[in-house]
């Protein structure tokens, strides 16, 4: 039987899941921020020891991480310079030329990852059709290199106008800089995001360069360490799209890994929603550093070619950094167990986006941290067992948590420590609810017909409060919820997506050009996919991003995987108008369409099992113990029962409030919910009025 190992590195914890002979083994260790590969190996060794296996027994390794995401959110990437077409150095700051919050006179735009003095103009110009209008001036390149050397930049991004149509200038500049600054990693936009739209392409390329030194060093060290430890299995990296890529590709394009950890969680939610027969769900993943929210309809996560990371202003669109990469569409905010709480100038409790991470960690970790965090608040409220936090990986010090909350929140606001802890929990829950609501409005989604699937180390602790705020009546806590994203890695299809911008007016449709383009894209995708699977039965999905001529935005139009012919023009137009009619309720007569970008995804195709869960109310088990837990609505402590999840059986039911503890997390069931164990051993938390 195949031995599959998944490792998910988060900002605070590193999770390991190993599956062998239909048995699952899990482990959780603290992330080693200065040397993340050390935490990877520690987690791998721990789960191998639990399963009585050796490194040579592993057949397949899948790895995902939020390290890249957290580096952007926390602004801890490399000192980066941007070389762009002369006269366009302020494109990063101009952005979309509009205010994302019209009514706020004090609105502030997010500061670019590259400061103005490191955005350097290069004299050159390429036209939209790829022709050279102004030849590349190497003197301006030399001056930029001198500036980069003087400023001791750690990474360089290169993005010229219309380079997706002709990458000659970008490659020439990259080649020159590699000879003069050989130790500085370089990202070029024609490789990172070969698509139209200048600001999005520049933002994506800058973000890639910003995290490149961190991720490249990490991946190189990891690859060498795995070989040294006796692993011979191929290593694949989860991408933001939910597909896989090779180690070499990931070292060049780490921006594709930005949502790799959360993507695994969305895949898990997709499978759980199908098993439970829930076509509409909200996927809620809360770890130690960030919280991720994703909408899943008809057992399919929302996908996009545009994503915004590190939103800082009320979670509004435009207040983060746009990335033009294939991605499972979700909103992510700095709200995790390690999110730091403070009091702002208006005497309000503020939580995140800064995180204590794994080092120094929350004050209660006793590793040098002194700032109050969400974990400290949960500990003070009695929701966490200080002796068995994260499966015993960390023994929490309650007195240190009390001291931090007293100094940071209680004294400045003249509150009790317990009320301060309650305030932190309420603020972080409201932050997540607000982010979910804004994202729902952007997507045109509703909550009242959705269930929630909650996983991650902190999500089961906060799921009930979030569900009540969003008017969600059912919550699913899957098995192994504390390491949910890593479990999702093992259930993912091996897939890779390639996208290229090539403008085509349907009036002048040339199928031979597009067929050649698709063949090139398919070869690129196949080079990645074939390293992770031996099967020849692959699914090929093609998409044309189309619009009416003169419009500003495209819609995704699926096309078949057969060679295009002259007759394909009419088929493309009919398919486009059918999709346009579905989305907007009308078509525009007598107007031709144009295609801006082409996409090809090659993947395996695992069968999705549906509607196999059921809930029966059979037995109310005896509680293992009782504990005093702070009740937020009542503003006081109350004694509630504690259950151990591994002792529960299908048919068991436990009315709230209660705590259900397991190896890597704890579920807090509020007084408004009742917990049931279904036949898949998933916990189903259902509003009391909705009980079966």
Image: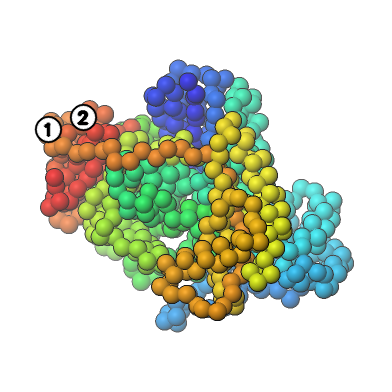
Q: Position of residue 243 (x, y in %)?
A: 53, 44
Q: Secondary structure at mark 1?
A: loop
Q: Which residue is located at x 73 percent, y 64 percent? A: 165
Residue at image x 71%, y 53%?
A: 516
| Marker disc for residue 542 | none
Q: CA distance from mark 2 to mark 1?
A: 9 Å
Quadrant assignment, res 458: top left
Other residues around mark 2 within 10 Å, as few (<14) / some (14–19) / many (≥20): some
User: In the structure shown, which secondary structural element does the residue marked by tag 2 occupy?
Assistant: loop
In this orientation, which residue lies closer to the viewer: 269 or 262? 269
Q: Which residue is mark 1?
A: 619
Earlier in the chain: of badge 2 and badge 1, it is 1
Work out whether residue 14 can be spotted.
no
In percent of width and height, residue 684 lies at 23, 42
* Residue that badge 2 annotates: 649
Q: Residues within 10 Å of mark 1 (few under 14, many from 20)?
A: some
Total marks placed: 2
Q: Residue at x 26, y 58 (%)?
A: 449
Confirm whether residue 106 shows in the render: yes
Q: Is residue 300 left or right of residue 55?
A: left
- The answer to whether mark 2 and mark 1 are in CB contact below 8 A is yes
């Amino acid at each position: 039987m195949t031995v599959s190992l998944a490792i998910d590195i988060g900002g605070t914890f590193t999770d390991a899941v190993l599956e062998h002979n239909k048995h699952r083994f899990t482990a959780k260790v603290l992330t080693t921020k200065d040397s993340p590969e050390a935490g990877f190996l520690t987690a791998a060794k721990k789960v191998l020891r639990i399963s009585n296996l050796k490194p040579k027994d592993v057949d397949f390794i899948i790895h995902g991480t939020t390290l890249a995401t957290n580096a952007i959110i926390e602004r801890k990437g490399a000192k980066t310079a941007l070389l762009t077409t002369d006269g366009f150095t302020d494109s990063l700051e101009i952005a979309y030329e509009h205010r994302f919050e019209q009514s706020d006179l004090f609105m502030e735009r997010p500061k670019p990852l590259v400061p103005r003095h490191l955005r350097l103009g290069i004299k050159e110009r390429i036209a939209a059709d790829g022709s050279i209008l102004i030849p590349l001036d190497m003197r301006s390149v030399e001056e930029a290199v001198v500036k980069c050397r003087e400023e001791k930049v750690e990474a360089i991004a290169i993005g010229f106008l219309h380079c997706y149509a002709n990458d000659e200038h970008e490659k020439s500049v990259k080649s020159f800089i590699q000879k003069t600054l050989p130790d500085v990693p370089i990202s070029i936009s024609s490789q990172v995001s070969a698509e139209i739209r200048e600001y999005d392409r520049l933002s994506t390329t800058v973000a890639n360069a910003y995290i490149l030194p961190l991720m490249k060093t990490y991946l190189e060290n990891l690859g060498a360490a795995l070989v040294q430890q006796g692993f011979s299995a191929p290593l694949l990296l989860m991408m933001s799209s939910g597909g896989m890529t090779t180690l070499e590709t990931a070292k060049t394009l780490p921006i594709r890994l930005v949502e790799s950890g959360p993507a695994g969680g969305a895949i898990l939610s997709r499978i759980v929603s199908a098993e439970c027969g829930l076509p509409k769900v909200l996927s809620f993943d809360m770890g130690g550093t960030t919280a991720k929210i994703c909408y899943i309809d008809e057992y399919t996560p929302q996908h996009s070619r545009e994503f915004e990371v590190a939103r800082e202003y009320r979670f509004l669109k435009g207040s983060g950094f746009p990335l033009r990469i294939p991605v499972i569409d979700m909103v992510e905010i700095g709200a995790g167990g390690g999110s730091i709480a403070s009091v702002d100038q208006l005497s309000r409790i503020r939580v995140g986006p800064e995180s204590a991470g794994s080092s120094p960690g929350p004050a209660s970790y006793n590793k040098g941290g002194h700032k109050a965090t969400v974990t400290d608040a949960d500990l003070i409220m009695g929701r966490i067992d200080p002796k068995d936090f994260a499966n015993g990986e960390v023994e929490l010090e309650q007195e240190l948590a009390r001291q931090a909350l007293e100094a940071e929140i209680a004294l400045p606001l003249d509150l009790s420590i317990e009320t301060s802890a309650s305030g932190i929990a309420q603020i972080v829950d409201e932050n997540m609810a607000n982010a979910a609501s804004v994202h729902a409005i952007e997507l045109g989604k509703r909550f009242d017909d959705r269930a929630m699937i909650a996983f991650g180390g902190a999500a089961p602790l906060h799921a009930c409060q979030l569900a009540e705020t969003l008017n969600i009546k059912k919550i699913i806590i899957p098995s192994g919820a504390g390491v949910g994203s890593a479990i999702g890695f093992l259930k993912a299809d091996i897939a890779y997506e390639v996208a290229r911008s090539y403008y085509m007016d349907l009036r002048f449709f040339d199928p031979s050009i597009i067929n050649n383009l698709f063949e090139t894209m398919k070869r690129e995708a196949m080079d990645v996919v074939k390293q992770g699977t031996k099967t020849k039965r692959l699914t090929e999905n093609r998409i044309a991003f189309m619009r009416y001529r003169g419009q500003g935005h495209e819609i995704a139009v699926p096309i078949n995987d057969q060679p295009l012919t002259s007759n394909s023009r009419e088929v493309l137009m009919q398919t486009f108008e059918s999709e346009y009619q579905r989305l907007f309720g009308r078509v525009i007569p007598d107007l031709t369409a144009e295609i801006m970008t082409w996409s090809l995804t090659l993947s395996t195709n695992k069968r999705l099992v549906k509607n196999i869960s059921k809930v029966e109310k059979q037995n109310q088990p005896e509680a293992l113990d009782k504990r005093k837990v702070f009740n937020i609505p009542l503003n006081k402590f109350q004694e509630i029962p504690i259950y151990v999840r591994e002792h529960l059986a299908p048919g068991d039911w436990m009315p709230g409030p209660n705590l259900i503890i397991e190896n890597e997390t704890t579920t807090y069931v509020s007084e408004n919910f009742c917990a049931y164990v279904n036949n898949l051993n998933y916990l189903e938390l259902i509003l009391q009025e909705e009980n079966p």
